Image (cartoon, rainbow, N blue to C red):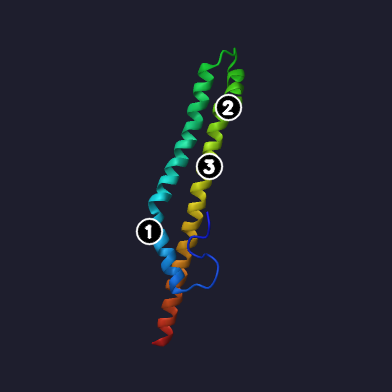
């Protein structure tokens, strides 16, 4: 994901506006990304359970080992990785945008206070 609102550089009204706009526009994406991450985490357990149930191995340990080694489980691990990466990237930008907006508000307040 590229720099959506100029994270680097001097904090200006334009950057603060861009950061705030990004927060508003991306709030639904952040929520969806978190839900996708949680679903992928739950699917990991579902895939493991289904693989264990389908196994013909004699011991629980052998069934569990087969489940972890299955392609379906590996696909679920990769899906969780992608969902987590998407969510954490959006969350990092969210935090940065909040800091830019907060910093601008603080700078603007200090500037107004010095004029009084």
Q: Residues within 10 Å of mark 2 (few under 14, many from 20)?
A: few
Q: CA distance from mark 3 to mark 2?
A: 16 Å
What is the x, y in percent for residue 30? 43, 50
Compared with 71, 89 (above or below) is below
What is the x, y in percent for residue 104? 45, 72
- Residue 115 sits in which quadrant? bottom left
- Residue 14 sits in which quadrant? bottom left
Residue drawn at the location 42% of the way across and 72% of the way down: 105
Q: Earlier in the sequence, mark 3 or mark 2?
A: 2
Residue that mark 2 sits on: 71
Residue drawn at the location 48% of the way across and 48% of the way down: 87
What is the x, y in percent for residue 29? 41, 50
Q: CA distance from mark 2 to mark 1?
A: 39 Å
The tally of labels here is 3
Compared with 2, 113 (above or below) is below
What is the x, y in percent for residue 110? 44, 79
Residue that mark 3 sits on: 82
Q: Element under label 2?
A: helix
Q: Earlier in the sequence, mark 3 or mark 1?
A: 1
Q: Element under label 3?
A: helix
| Image quadrant in which the C terminus is located | bottom left
Residue drawn at the location 46% of the way across and 76% of the way down: 107
Q: Earlier in the sequence, mark 2 or mark 1?
A: 1
Image position of 51 (left or right of 113) = right
Q: CA distance from mark 3 to mark 1?
A: 24 Å
Q: Assess whether mark 1 and mark 3 are in contact (beta carbons under 8 angstroms).
A: no
Residue drawn at the location 47% of the way across and 70% of the way down: 103
Residue placed most toward the observer, 27 or 45: 27
The image's mark for residue 24 is 1
Compared with 27, 72 (above or below) is above
Image position of 57 (left or right of 42) = right
Q: Assess whether mark 1 and mark 2 are in contact (beta carbons under 8 angstroms).
A: no
């Amino acid at each position: 994901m590229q720099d959506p609102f100029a994270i680097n550089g001097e904090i200006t009204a334009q950057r603060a506006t861009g950061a705030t706009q990004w927060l508003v526009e991306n709030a639904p994406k952040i929520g969806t990304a978190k839900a996708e991450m949680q679903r992928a985490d739950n699917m990991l357990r579902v895939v493991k359970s289904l693989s264990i149930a389908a196994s013909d191995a004699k011991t629980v340990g052998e069934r569990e080992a087969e489940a972890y080694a299955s392609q379906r489980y590996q696909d679920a691990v990769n899906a969780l990785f992608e969902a987590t990466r998407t969510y954490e990237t959006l969350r990092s930008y969210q935090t940065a945008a909040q800091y830019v907006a907060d910093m601008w508000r603080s700078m603007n307040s200090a500037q107004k206070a010095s004029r009084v």
